[in-house]
Amino acid sequence: MTPSCPEKFAINVKGLSKSFDGKKAVDGIELRVREGEVFGFIGPNGSGKTTTIRMLCGLLVPDAGEGTCLGYDVINESAEIRKQIGYMTQKFSLYDELTIEENLLFVGRMYQMKDLKEKVGETLAGLALTERRRQLAGTLSGGWKQRLALASCIMHEPKLLLLDEPTAGVDPKARRAFWDEIHALAANGITVLVSTHYMDEAERCHRLGYILKGKLLAHGTGADMIERSDLKTWRVTGRGLTGLAKKLTGLKGIETVAAFGARLHVSGADEPALLKSLAPFRKEKSLHFEKVAPSLEDIFIHFMSGQESAVEERAP
């Protein structure tokens, strides 16, 4: 029997912590991202996603922790890490007054790239930017700015992409095209760590990590996280759902009530208590109740609610 090859990790860190003005932004994170996978970093604003990414790419020095990124020590070899990653920030960070082509030439000179004009031409063609190469970056729509930012990140052929909420404010069509590009890059061996707020994007990642208040609460494939969850969810359809949501919120056993279009998801971990609270409403003929598997969004709302309750319990 042939022994299996050991897993190779592009990111392998533990205990990463960072504080600002005495407040912990990241608290002991342990993270492993396999080579060639798309890893989704999920969590609300202020949860520590950006701080973690900036520590991984050497822009912030951790207060504690250890590990490697692309085989280099995240504490002592950050300069080597920065040479081999592409980092796309939340905010468009290229020059509005330069054309698409001029921006890429500028980035290429920073990396001291050889055959620069040829490489810029290949990058423009690869991301369908050739026809717009003389357009000023400041006149581009959000989707085209996003495409230009990605081009600037991959032109030097990095081994790892760190993308910090790259699709925020971009229309759905442009988001889908962007994710097609991400998966094409991963298929060619590039590792991608991407933070996002969008659950449809989370479902397109190979694995996920959920971070809240600086702690990594869960990680694994989306299917794994749903299977391991102790959450029980009921889908409700019918009339008067807005009023129903108000009545259900806060009842024993009901942890979350979330609207998904013309339906409600009512969830809780204590199934007997959940069923008892739902029982009177299930008798109403205008409502239809169906037990369903929780969605990723149900699980993430559950995590957030649990942490908020824990904070309230600890408060003096």
Image (spheres, rainbow, N blue to C red):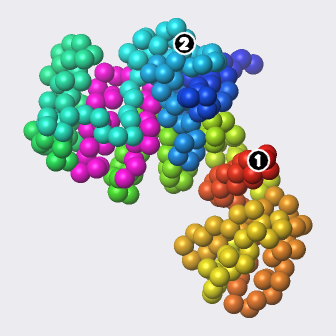
Q: Is residue 224 above or below residue 77?
A: below
Q: Position of residue 188 (x, y in %)?
A: 42, 29
- Residue 75's disc is 2
Q: Which mark is residue 129?
A: none
Give the farthest residue toward the front.
Answer: 316
- Amino acid bearing label 2: Ile
Residue at image mark 1:
315
Q: Nearer the viewer, residue 18 or 80?
A: 18
Q: What span is in magenta?
A: 141-169
Q: Is residue 197 above or below residue 269?
A: above
Residue 168, how many percent across, how many down?
Answer: 40, 49
Q: Is residue 155 left or right of residue 106?
A: right
Q: Earlier in the sequence, mark 1 or mark 2?
A: 2
Dot 1 alpha-carbon crowd within 10 angstroms: few under 14, some 14 to 19, many 20 or more: few
Is residue 285 located in the magenta-colored stretch of the structure? Answer: no
Q: Nearer the viewer, mark 1 or mark 2?
A: 1
Near-viewer residue (249 or 199) = 249
- Percent from the top left, x then y, of residue 86? 38, 26
Give neighbour class at mark 2: few <14, some 14-19, many 20+ (Cα, 10 Å): many
- Where is the N terminus found, in terms of image quarters? top right
Q: Amino acid at mark 1?
A: Ala
Where is residue 36 drawn, in percent x and y?
51, 29
Residue appearing at x 70%, y 63% in the figure: 256
The residue under the point 26% across, 43% down is 145
**Residue visible at 33% across and 29% down?**
153
Looking at the image, which residue sits at the far left? 134
* Residue 233 appears in view: no
Which residue appears farthest toward the top when viewing the image?
76
Q: In the rendered image, which quarter is residue 210 located in?
A: top right
